Image: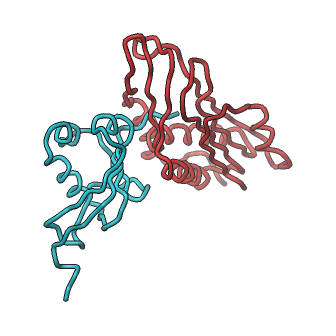
């Protein structure tokens, strides 16, 4: 049996910060992802799954919108790998200092 | 070398922090600090209150990484970053960056590097309360440019 090649339901913890938390009406949620093999899931897949809900998710996560992603507290690029159980945070442009 | 970072709701006392940073270290010939404060006017609107939000768990890690990067680039002895979160009023202190070094050049450069990077890499967000309602502060292109300056240019101070 080859688990890594079998598309299954993978669940990640998605965290929404600042403006995105208000726009989505939640600070975090468990997001099940289907149809993607466990060894191929990327940040882009997570964003696409959220955007496919339409509405404010589609608007805020449209291509070209300035959203950065941190996986397990480290900023990463869209092609970065995501594993089941990872914390995937969506960050609007930061304004500290 | 302690290289401390702190995220806190409480205010900080700059003089005491600077004294503690260089205490007992007679190698230090320069202490440079930056203090960021809340302005009462932003983008043509009166600001009556500001709330600083962050991403607990990631914030300290991001600040540690920025300070470690500064230590790698500049000849500094120690660095301190304090960033406040929660509700703040105009004129309140928001952030302190302080650096010790043998000489002023390295200290100035490292302090500026840390605050420039903090503004584009550390997960903090400002929400302003104005007479027209609350609004999230927009990120500035000028902050990205300030950080990019460090990314693209090699550190030029002589290390010989």
Chain drawn in red: B
The answer to whether A52 is drawn above or below residue B93 in the figure is: below
Q: Position of residue B104 (x, y in %)?
A: 70, 38
Residue at horizontal 48%, vertical 43%?
Answer: B122
Chain depicted in cyan: A
The answer to whether residue A97 is left or right of residue A5 is right
Q: Nearer the viewer, residue B138 or B145?
A: B138
Please say which color scheme the image uses.
by chain
Q: Nearer the viewer, residue B50 or A13?
A: A13
Q: Position of residue A76 (x, y in %)?
A: 35, 55
Q: Residue furthest bottom?
A: A1
A82 shown above or below B8: below
**At 40% across and 36% down in the image, what residue appears?**
B144
Identify which residue is drawn at 81% across, 49% down.
B27
Q: Is residue B131 above or below residue A76?
A: above
- Place residue A77 in its image quadrant: bottom left
Image quadrant holding the N terminus of chain B, namely bottom right
Camera-side residue of A41 and A66: A41
Q: Is residue B147 left or right of residue B24?
A: left
Instruction: Residue at 20% x, 37% y: name it.
Output: A56
Give the number of marks: 0
Taking the image as shown, residue A6 lies to the left or right of residue B38, namely left
Whole-percent x, y for residue A63 in the image: 18, 43
Where's the C terminus of chain B, which quadrant? Answer: bottom right
Residue B119, position as x, y percentages in the image? 48, 37
């Amino acid at each position: 049996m080859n688990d890594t090649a079998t598309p299954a339901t993978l669940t990640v913890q998605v965290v929404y910060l600042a403006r995105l938390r208000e726009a989505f009406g939640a600070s975090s949620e468990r997001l099940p992802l289907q149809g993607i093999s466990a060894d191929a899931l990327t940040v882009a897949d997570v964003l696409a799954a959220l955007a496919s809900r339409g509405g404010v998710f589609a608007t805020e996560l449209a291509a070209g919108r300035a959203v950065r992603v941190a996986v397990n507290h480290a900023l990463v690029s869209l092609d970065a790998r995501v594993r089941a159980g990872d914390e995937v945070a969506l960050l609007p442009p930061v304004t500290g200092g | 070398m302690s290289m401390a970072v702190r995220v806190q709701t409480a205010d900080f006392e700059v003089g005491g922090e600077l004294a503690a940073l260089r205490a007992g270290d007679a190698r230090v010939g320069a202490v440079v600090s930056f203090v960021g404060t809340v302005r009462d006017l932003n983008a043509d609107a009166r600001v009556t209150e500001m709330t600083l939000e962050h991403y607990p768990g990631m914030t300290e890690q991001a600040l540690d990484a920025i300070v470690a990067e500064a230590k790698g680039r500049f000849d500094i002895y120690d660095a301190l970053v304090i960033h406040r979160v929660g509700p703040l009023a105009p004129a309140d202190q928001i952030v302190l960056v302080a650096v010790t070094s043998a000489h002023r050049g390295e200290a100035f450069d490292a302090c500026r590097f840390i605050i420039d990077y903090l503004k584009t890499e550390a997960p903090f967000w400002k929400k302003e309360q104005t007479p027209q309602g609350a609004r999230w502060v927009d990120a500035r292109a000028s902050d990205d440019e300030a950080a990019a300056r460090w990314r693209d240019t090699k550190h030029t101070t002589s290390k010989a």
